Image (cartoon, helix red, strand yellow):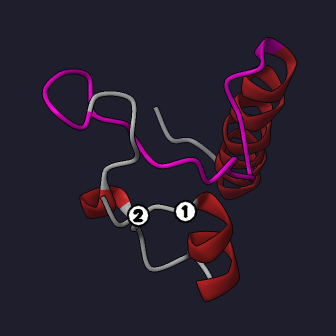
Amino acid sequence: MKIKMHIIAISVFVILFGGMGIAMATGTWSTSSDKVPATYKDGAFAGEYNPEDIRGSYTFEEVSTLRIFQLH
């Protein structure tokens, strides 16, 4: 059985954008980030931001407003 090229093109389009549509409808698709780094769960710094969780997408302003690097 041969599948025609236009059927394949339509199928790819439906699968790709249909999957995105379903993900958006269920709330699992997100194109933005809240940019809140992980916090320490226990130990002396429990509840404070973990500096190792800073990613390259953070700006200097975001890092300074989060007060990740605090002097104790």
| Left or right relative to 46: residue 14 | right
| Residue 4 lies within the magenta run | no
Instruction: List x then y, in percent, for residue 13.
Output: 76, 48
Classified by dominant secondary structure, the portion drawn in magenta counts as loop
Look at the numbered discs 1 and 2 and tell me whether their residues touch, using CB distance below 8 Å: yes
Q: Could you tell me the amino acid type at mark 2?
A: Gln
- The residue most toward the front is 72
Residue at 68% across, 43% down: 16
- The image quadrant of residue 45 is top left
Q: What stretch is highlighted in magenta?
A: 26-45
Residue at 70% across, 39% down: 11
| Residue 42 lies within the magenta run | yes
Instruction: List x then y, in percent, for residue 61.
Output: 69, 81
Q: Residue 70 carries which label?
A: 2
Give whichever of 68, 5 is nearer the camera.
68
- Bin the neighbour count of mark 2 within 10 Å (Cα to Cα): few under 14, some 14-19, many 20 and up: few
Residue at 78% across, 31% down: 18
Q: Could you tell me the amino acid type at mark 1?
A: Arg
- The image quadrant of residue 60 is bottom right
Element at label 1: loop
